[in-house]
Image: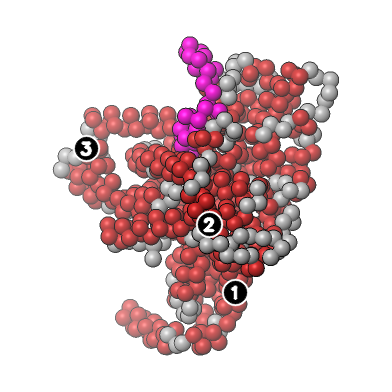
Amino acid sequence: MANINISSKKTGVTKVKPERFKPLKKSLKRNFDLYLLIAPVLIYFLVFHYFPMYGVQIAFKNFNASLGIWGSPWVGFDHFERFFNSFFFWRLILNTLGIGLYTLALAFPIPIIIALMLNEARNAKFKKFVQTVIYAPHFLSTVVVVGMLLLFLKPDGLLNQLIILFGGEPIYFITEPSWFKTIYVFSEVWQTMGWSSIIYLAALTAVDKQLHEAAVIDGANRLQRIWHINIPTIMPTIVILFILNAGTVMSVGFEKVFLMQNSLNMSASDVISTYVYRSGILEAQYSFSAAIGLFNSVINFILLVMVNYFAKKANQTSLW
Amino acid sequence: MKDSKSDKVVDIINYFLLVIVALLVIYPLLFVLSASLSDPRSVINGEVWLWPKGFTLDAYAKLFQNQDLIRGFVNTFKYTSVGTIINIVLTIMAAYPLSRRDFVGRNVLMAILVFTMFFSGGLIPLYLLIRDLGMLDTFWVMVIPNAVSIFNIIIMRTFFQSIPWELQEASIIDGCSNIQILTKIILPLSMPVIAVMVLFYSVGHWNSYFNALIYLTDRDKFPLQLILREILIQSQTDEMIQSTTESIVEQQMMVEGLKYAVLIVSSLPMLILYPFLQRYFVTGLMIGSIKG
């Protein structure tokens, strides 16, 4: 009976199959509505993503409002040269890279450890409770998180009151450049560690229970089982996410850095994206800041292509 | 499984560390809640550590008299609801055709969309485009430039692909149109992933301030987060205090209490929403992770 069922199903498939592989024309005719369905999304991407890529040519022009993007005169790499030779260049590169690497060093491994710990907690209610708690900061806005930081870290804030209680001197965390990156990264860890652990928890559900049973019979203790069974199982996920994260070290987001910035910590907090905002949107130097933005986009793209290349070599897994 | 003695020690240490982690996350939030309910004087003098001191709802009462804040809430509510509807509709409209194996050209279309994840023209060309389109300072600038996220399209497409193809094939043979298959078969089966998408998109709208900062100058259109930024970060709190009888010190006290209250009120909607959808997170994120 089973055999008959399967074979009749198969003939059903073969009846439709030829149509699937007929050329575009046929598909256009039969799936006309599907093309209509996706058309608005395609238009959105062309207008709001591809058109700006075309418009980025102002980075090689001297933008003149009356002539527009297309009519403005070409100047080649002038804006790039000006940026490379500017006082800000190395400061921006080092701050952007510094924050990126510092974040990678802490915000990447901690979620893995948390996922491994949660996986060991056998009390389901306790586990669920801890998860609910540590996911919460992910749902706070950047403005709220930075607002909390300012309240806690100001000279008479919670943390300084604690320092005074233990006989220390208050620290001006918010305005002190040397504290900027640490505050940025630790608050980032606080906000993202729970959420980022979800993906590793999901990967840990794939661990083969029989391996654990066999290991117990062989006398392996819990730490040994975590080390020799759980970690190797999630290793591909770890490698992929590490490589993906490593590809974004030069694309530090604007939102949080901008809110944490003040005139006193600028030497440590000025990054490429905040500089583009200041010179482009506030000072209307469109061509110059478009050039800086393009420079950053190209660096990010190169990093990503490199990272993808290594992913292919190491894991036979890649983005494209 | 029977635990050896060393395993029990590991177990206890593990529970202990998890409790510490949970406390580290929840303590700042509890402190903000307590501080918002306390007499501002006690907060500044460092008397509040965990529980409210000198319980009062004054800060919340002042909060709801503030016109800017109320307008911000109303605006954000509009941007979030309209924006999320646009997001969900467009995500489905892109994800469904791309999930169909008989949709010729889907690989090319997918590549066109995915490329934008890796390369962009940057802020300035986009700003000039939006200016030229006359969208600056309009309602639409808050919902159209972020109309759909390619990452979420990928998650939803992968979910659609996990629905057995035979189901759709049978309907095609029965003479169902593609739109009927989508609305009658695919969507009813996809409610968990749609719920997660609604959460992701609405949290994004509720919490973002970047687009408003760049594209809006009209205070009447400011979303909640920009008003929050003024109160919490730029401390433009002069207008917040409407009473003129209080001394300057008193005013500063009031501002202090307000800041804690405003943190709570603005975060509450999302903090209440997510635990209900928590069980879908793993499904939603795991599906997305398959394709990176």
Residue of label 3: A221
The image's mark for residue A39 is 1
Q: Amino acid at mark 3?
A: Asn
State the residue at coordinates (50%, 73%).
Answer: B109
The residue carrying pointer 2 sits among few (fewer than 14), some (14 to 19) or many (20 or more) residues within 10 Å by Cα, namely: some
Above or below — where is A48 with respect to A8?
A: above
Q: Quadrant of the C terminus of chain A?
A: bottom left
Badge 2 marks a residue whose secondary structure is helix
Q: Closest to the observer: A284 or A24?
A: A284
Q: Nearer the viewer, mark 1 or mark 3?
A: 1
The magenta region covers A160-188
- Discs 2 and 1 lie in a common subunit: yes
Q: Closest to the observer: B274 or A236?
A: A236
Above or below — where is B143 with respect to B277?
A: below
In the picture as drawn, the residue positioned furthest to the left comes out as A218
Task: Please say which color scheme the image uses.
Answer: secondary structure
The image's mark for residue A78 is 2
Q: Amino acid at mark 2?
A: Asp
State the residue at coordinates (56%, 45%).
Answer: A275
The disc, 1 or 3, on the residue closer to the chain's N-terminal end is: 1
- Discs 1 and 3 lie in a common subunit: yes
Above or below — where is A233 with respect to A145?
A: below
Q: Closest to the observer: A254 or B152?
A: A254
Q: Is residue B50 visible from the viewing direction of this image?
A: no
Above or below — where is A195 with respect to B178?
A: above
| Residue A182 among those drawn in magenta | yes
| Majority SS type along the magenta span | helix
The number of callouts visible is 3
